[in-house]
Image (cartoon, rainbow, N blue to C red):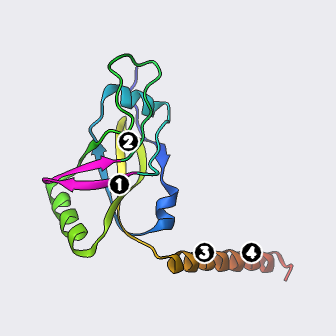
């Protein structure tokens, strides 16, 4: 059987971009059990309630739901267990400083296979206020209207 190559998306957390302003992103590996990988190959995961914490110099992914593998036996995994993230020591030190000083949180944005290995994109993010969310929606609507008008003028329908 040939080895996998390329990138295959498993799950995305679209709501995170709406609820948080993202300042920086990091790619991290995951320590998983065999049945978790098999469940992820079926494309089943949810990042909605997920977040990451730093405990004793290690980064842990919490609240991410990977459902039990249907063909698994007594060796099946727990769906919402804490999973260790694999990052370089310098990245962890940077994250510790940024989360302690600025009140930022670590939020998973997406989970994917990269050359057969499961990776997570972590975002260093700060929570948005309600007025920030409304401003973002208004800006997006304005940009959509500008693009629509530009398209009309380009087609000659002024």
Query: Mark 3 and 1 residues: CB-CB less than 8 Å, in contact?
Result: no
Instruction: Tell me where residue 47 appears, x and y as whole percent.
Output: 44, 48
Dot label at residue 148: 4
Query: Dot 3: few (<14), some (14–19), or many (≥20) neighbours within 10 Å?
Result: few
Query: Mark 4 or mark 1: which is in front?
Result: 1
Instruction: Tell me where residue 137 appears, x and y as whole percent.
Output: 60, 74
Q: Of label 3 and label 2, which has the lower sequence position?
A: 2
Of residues 51 and 27, the one nearer the viewer is 51
Dot label at residue 51: 1
Q: Main secondary structure of the magenta part?
A: strand
Q: Left or right? Give the position of 15 relative to 64.
A: right
Residue name at image x 42 percent, y 41 percent? 65
Query: Dot 2: few (<14), some (14–19), or many (≥20) neighbours within 10 Å?
Result: some
Q: Of label 3 and label 4, which has the lower sequence position?
A: 3
Q: Left or right? Give the position of 133 relative to 64.
A: right
Q: Of label 3 and label 1, which has the lower sequence position?
A: 1
* Quarter of the view holding residue 156: bottom right
Of residues 105 and 11, the one nearer the viewer is 105
* Quarter of the view holding residue 6: top left
Question: How far is disc 3 from disc 2 in space, using C-alphas?
Answer: 33 Å
Classify mark 3: helix, strand or loop.
Answer: helix
Query: Mark 4 and 1 residues: CB-CB less than 8 Å, in contact?
Result: no
Query: Mark 3 or mark 1: which is in front?
Result: 1
Instruction: Tell me where residue 78 appears, x and y as whole percent.
Output: 35, 32
Is 134 included in the stretch rendered in magenta? no
Question: How far is disc 2 from disc 1 in space, using C-alphas?
Answer: 21 Å
Q: Which residues are magenta?
A: 50-62
Q: Which residue is mark 3?
A: 137
Question: How far is disc 4 from disc 2 in space, using C-alphas?
Answer: 37 Å
Question: How far is disc 3 from disc 1 in space, using C-alphas?
Answer: 25 Å
Tally of numbered discs = 4
């Amino acid at each position: 059987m040939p080895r996998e190559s390329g990138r295959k998306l498993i799950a995305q957390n679209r709501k995170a971009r709406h609820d948080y302003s993202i300042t920086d992103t990091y790619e991290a590996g995951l320590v998983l059990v065999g049945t978790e990988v098999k469940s992820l190959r079926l494309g089943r995961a949810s990042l909605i309630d997920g977040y990451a914490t730093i405990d004793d110099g290690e980064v842990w992914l919490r609240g991410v739901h990977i459902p039990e593998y249907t063909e698994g036996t007594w060796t099946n995994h727990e769906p919402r267990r804490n999973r260790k993230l694999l990052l370089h020591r310098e990245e962890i030190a940077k994250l510790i400083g940024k989360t302690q000083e600025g009140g930022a949180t670590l939020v998973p944005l997406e989970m994917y296979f990269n050359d057969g290995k499961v990776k997570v994109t972590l975002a260093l993010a700060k929570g948005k206020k309600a007025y920030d969310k409304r401003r973002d929606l208004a800006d997006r609507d304005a940009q959509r209207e500008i693009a629509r008008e530009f398209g009309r003028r380009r087609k000659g329908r002024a």
